Amino acid sequence: MHVAIPLYPRFTALDAVGPYTVLAFAPGWRVTFVAPETGPVLDDRGSLSLTATTRLADLPHPDVILVPGGPGTLDALSDPALVGWIGAAHEHARWTTSVCSGSFLLGAAGVLRGRRATTHWGWLDQLAAFGAEPVSERVVTDGTVVTAAGVSAGIDMALTLLAEAADTATAQAVQLAIEYDPLPPFGAGSPKTAPAGLAERALSLIG
Amino acid sequence: MHVAIPLYPRFTALDAVGPYTVLAFAPGWRVTFVAPETGPVLDDRGSLSLTATTRLADLPHPDVILVPGGPGTLDALSDPALVGWIGAAHEHARWTTSVCSGSFLLGAAGVLRGRRATTHWGWLDQLAAFGAEPVSERVVTDGTVVTAAGVSAGIDMALTLLAEAADTATAQAVQLAIEYDPLPPFGAGSPKTAPAGLAERALSLIG
């Protein structure tokens, strides 16, 4: 199974690297970072560069598309090379997936019309502009399209996808290999459970 | 607060990028990827390169040291530039931390002698060779030394560290920003809860 993760300036690193690590540990799976041109791509903090090793044009038909989110999504929405690649690759892909605001790029490519989908809690309602039905769940599967909530949700999505695409035992073996037995020190990871007033402060960290 | 994450060949990407994302989202925190020489460093899967932007020698006194693990740790243990840098930087650092087998590099640098520490479940006992007391917990704090269990545990460690180094509300705001409200589809993330027989299969995925 060949997974392509498209990178664009100001993506959020964990959106890409969480599911990357899950899927790259799976036996027989291969993950390639792609971009309009090869080379390092700078993240949203300006302090991490991941290398795109393959041009979008040179990997038109991956089995799985995994689009990370990040503050750079807004600019990326008007990049015809990236959005066009997503739309065309989706026609052939077995799964088309996103993390966080990566779902807006799926939306711009026309992939979400009439589908249930999710994104970061901060802008979930905006998915409706792409013809999607916004769903407040951590991982949403609608046919071959799988979308995840904000940033860290890509890890849960990748395990869900791996169980579906391979089998449960493979996903569990990867989960154990990466010791994914999460124990956050606080229960503040969702606006439903976070202390009052924290949402504005959290959103101010992202931009 | 300035965090240095040293990279070496065949590190595990999520070990570095999980805590990176947490700490780089914190206001006033800066994270720099360092290595003996600048440039891209290839991970354990051979398909991801993170760029080291600063030479170890040019960042001798970070506030926080965060050492990722990975199959490359064994070779890195005999790299005097890296191990020497960890030991010397630790003398000045406010916190010295590791994820997964990164703790072996702390051990080689003499940082763990007489301290409680943890690492990936697969080789926890081996920490004793460095004079540490192995502890089967997700995040272990002993004075200014904080160690995390395998791969994904670095996210929990970084939130714990941030709460201690800044304050609880800052850590909670970052947790909400990255929507870290984990919901793994299986309970297989620890050998204590995984189905029988999965440990060997999980370890075979790592090497």
Image (cartoon, coloured by chain):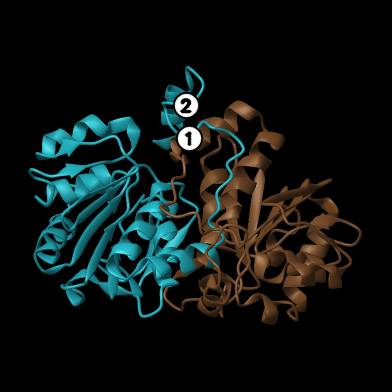
Chain colours: A cyan, B brown
Q: Position of residue A127 (x, y in %)?
A: 19, 37
Labelled pair 2, 1 in contact (Cβ < 8 Å): yes
Q: CA distance from mark 2 to mark 1?
A: 7 Å
Judged from this view, the residue extending furthest toward the top is A196
- Residue designated by label 2: A193
Is residue A10 something that shows in the picture? yes
For this rendering, which residue is in front, B104 or B76? B104
Q: Position of residue A25 (x, y in %)?
A: 45, 72
Q: Secondary structure at mark 2?
A: loop
- Residue designated by label 1: A189
User: Mark 1: which amino acid?
Assistant: Gly
User: Mark 2: which amino acid?
Assistant: Thr
Along the horizontal axis of the image, is B14 left or right of B113? left
- Dot 1, crowdedness within 10 Å: few (<14), some or many (≥20)? many
Q: Position of residue B43 (x, y in %)?
A: 51, 73
Question: Is B107 rendered above or below residue A182?
Answer: below
**Quadrant of the image for the N terminus of chain B?**
top right
Occupied quadrant, residue B179: top left
Occupied quadrant, residue A165: bottom left
Circle number at residue B23: none
Q: Secondary structure at mark 1?
A: loop
Q: Position of residue A56 (x, y in %)?
A: 21, 69
Tell me the residue at 50%/54% (across/down): B187
Task: Name the chain letter of the residue that bears numbered label 1.
Answer: A
Question: Is A124 rendered above or below residue A146?
Answer: above
